[in-house]
Amino acid sequence: MSVMSTPGRGSRLWPLWLMAALLLSGGLLVWIYWSQILLQSVLWQKDLHRQMTQLLQQVAEQPHQAGLSLVIFSLLYGVLHALGPGHGKVVIATFLATHPARVKTSIRLTLLASLLQGSVAIGLVTVMLVILQTSSRQLHLSSFWLEKGSYLLVIGLGVLMGYRALRALWRALRPRPAPLFRAFQPHHQHDAQCGCGHAHLPTPQQMQVSVSLKTQLLVVVSMGLRPCSGAIMMLLFAKVIGVYGWGVLSAAVMALGTALTISAIGVLVQQARSVAQRLAQPRETAGRARLLIPLLTLTGSLILIVAGLALWQSAQLTLGGGIRPF
């Protein structure tokens, strides 16, 4: 009788450890060079804003010739603008890394969040300056409090994730009662342990779906409630030179470009999570996964809470429409 040799556990999990090492190394590099990354992002965005204002001036003089160039540049601006550091990417990366989600769900969340951010900017400027005709100071004050509210929602999302993670840990660690078996009867009262082979209560996965819809809404609002500062500046300049309609179109296209970049980041995180799950071989590590997944979610919740508190403390009222990343 021949004995088949099976590879060691370490040899099976080396791709997972390699992925973790690469992620930690990338995070360390970002931490070390964070100030340079932020400064370079601000400089790039200033240059893009200058080119955008020049295109808006050309549209004011020759709308038919410069309109298409403005739309194309606005799309590219949105794509590049979303590559900079910002709380939206922290929220979506943390959520997708700690929650099982399909590719369609990832794209839907990022798309809705980016479009909501652009819509908030358009709606805010339209209501405050066009309809109510308030001052620019009132506009920036309203944008400031929307930004603060967005950070509060990030903290709330972290608290909600932490509560669910602690509850899952409690269920995993508490002793389970012995299963109760009952004799089959032709006519009996169905319950969760009747043993008839039918599902009379929703499974934990089904329960998570109904809850995750609320969580997904919180993710979208926490990312999109803060209006895009670049869109606000473009809308202000467009109103001053009398091409506000083109400014609205530019802001909408910018939101679409932002959605493309954030969606790509979301899909990348989701796919990385799927690869890590396959490499970990959940069938053999089901017991550990019952503890690992809630611990991972708890870690993500702490990241969101700390990030939300830091953003809340650092948020400042910029009356000049300062450059602030997504």
Image (tube, helix red, strand yellow):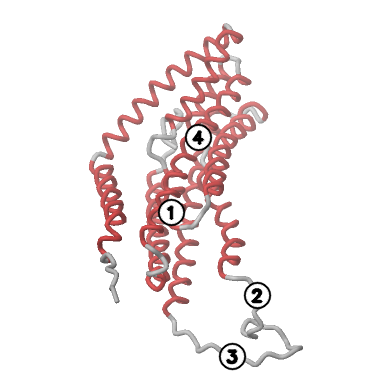
Q: Which residue is mark 3?
A: 181
Q: Which residue is mark 4?
A: 260
Look at label 2 and name its amino acid.
Ala
Q: Which sits earlier in the primary sequence, circle 4 or circle 1? A: 4
Figure quadrant of the N terminus: bottom left
Label 3 residue SS = loop
Residue 191, position as x, y percentages in the image: 67, 83
Q: Which residue is mark 2?
A: 199
Look at label 4 and name its amino acid.
Leu
Look at label 3 and name its amino acid.
Phe
**Mark 4 touches mark 2? (CB < 8 Å):** no
* Near-viewer residue (53 or 91): 91
**Relative to 12, is 18 above or below?**
above
Residue 274's tag is 1
Residue 211, position as x, y percentages in the image: 58, 62
- Residue at image point 67% right, 29% down: 131
Label 4 residue SS = helix
Q: Which sits earlier in the primary sequence, circle 4 or circle 2? A: 2
- Residue at image point 73% right, 87% down: 189
Residue 249, position as x, y percentages in the image: 60, 24
Residue 82, position as x, y percentages in the image: 44, 34
Q: Which sits earlier in the primary sequence, circle 3 or circle 4? A: 3
Q: Which sits earlier in the primary sequence, circle 2 or circle 3? A: 3
Q: Residues within 10 Å of mark 3 (few under 14, many from 20)?
A: few
Please name which of the two marks, 4 or 2, marks the residue nearer to the observer.
2
**Relative to 70, is 287 above or below?**
below
